Image (cartoon, helix red, strand yellow):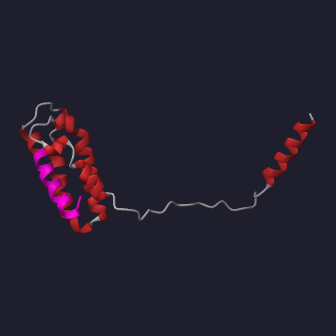
């Protein structure tokens, strides 16, 4: 019983500590660490949808297309001088999505051509970024 009373008293004393302080809001700052764009582009360059776009099932390339779209946005943000290259990446991505290629299992056709065009655009961006 005595221990409970001591703990309760200690809790009341400690709960009052710092009650007059103004809370501090800490906003995270953007790290100026190594540029991840070349690493991301290099990783995309190992995907089968990049290496053999004409033979891959468009349905199986949905994740690749999503990552490529993200990379185009990163190029646009981190390398304003390469905005035209980011747009060149976006065009076949838009064709892929508009044609609902994520639902097409058979390679070739408009969706296959979109993958071929994405691979060509990625090759160009990789050469410019150094990825």
Give me the residue at 23% from left, 69% from top.
81
Find the residue positioned furthest to the left: 109
Of residues 103 and 36, the one drawn nearer to the viewer in this rendering: 36
**Image quarter (top left, top right, bottom left or bottom right) of the N terminus:** top right
Tell me which secondary structure the magenta stretch mostly adopts: helix
Q: Is residue 129 magenta?
A: yes
How many numbered discs sit on the rendered protein? 0
**Where in the figure is residue 13, as x and y percent of width and height?**
84, 51
Q: Point out the image quarter for the C terminus.
A: bottom left
Residue beneath the point at 11% across and 49% down: 117
106 with respect to 75 (left or right): left
Q: Nearer the viewer, residue 17 or 31?
A: 31
Q: Quadrant of residue 126?
A: bottom left
Left or right: 108 as drawn, with respect to 94: left
Magenta residues, start to end: 115-131
User: Residue 31: image x %, image y %?
Assistant: 44, 62
Horizontal side of 2 relative to 123 (left or right) equals right
**Residue drawn at 11 percent across, 31 percent down:** 106
Outermost residue on the bottom side: it is 81
Residue 14 x, y percent position in the rendering: 80, 51
Q: Is residue 104 covered in magenta?
A: no
- Residue 46 image offset from top left, x and y in percent: 21, 46
Residue at far right of view = 2
Q: Is residue 68 left or right of residue 22?
A: left
* Vertical arrangement, residue 100 with respect to residue 32, above or below: above
């Amino acid at each position: 019983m005595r221990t409970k009373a001591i703990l309760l008293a200690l809790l009341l004393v400690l709960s009052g500590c710092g009650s007059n302080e103004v809370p501090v809001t800490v906003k995270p700052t953007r790290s100026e660490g190594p540029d991840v764009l070349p690493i991301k582009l290099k990783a995309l360059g190992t995907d089968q949808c990049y290496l053999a776009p004409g033979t891959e099932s468009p349905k199986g390339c949905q994740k690749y297309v999503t990552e490529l779209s993200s990379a185009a946005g990163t190029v646009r943000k981190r390398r304003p001088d390469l905005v035209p290259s980011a747009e060149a990446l976006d065009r076949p991505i838009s064709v892929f999505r508009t044609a609902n290629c994520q639902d097409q299992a058979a390679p070739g056709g408009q969706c296959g051509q979109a993958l071929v065009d994405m691979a060509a655009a990625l090759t160009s961006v990789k050469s410019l970024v150094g990825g």
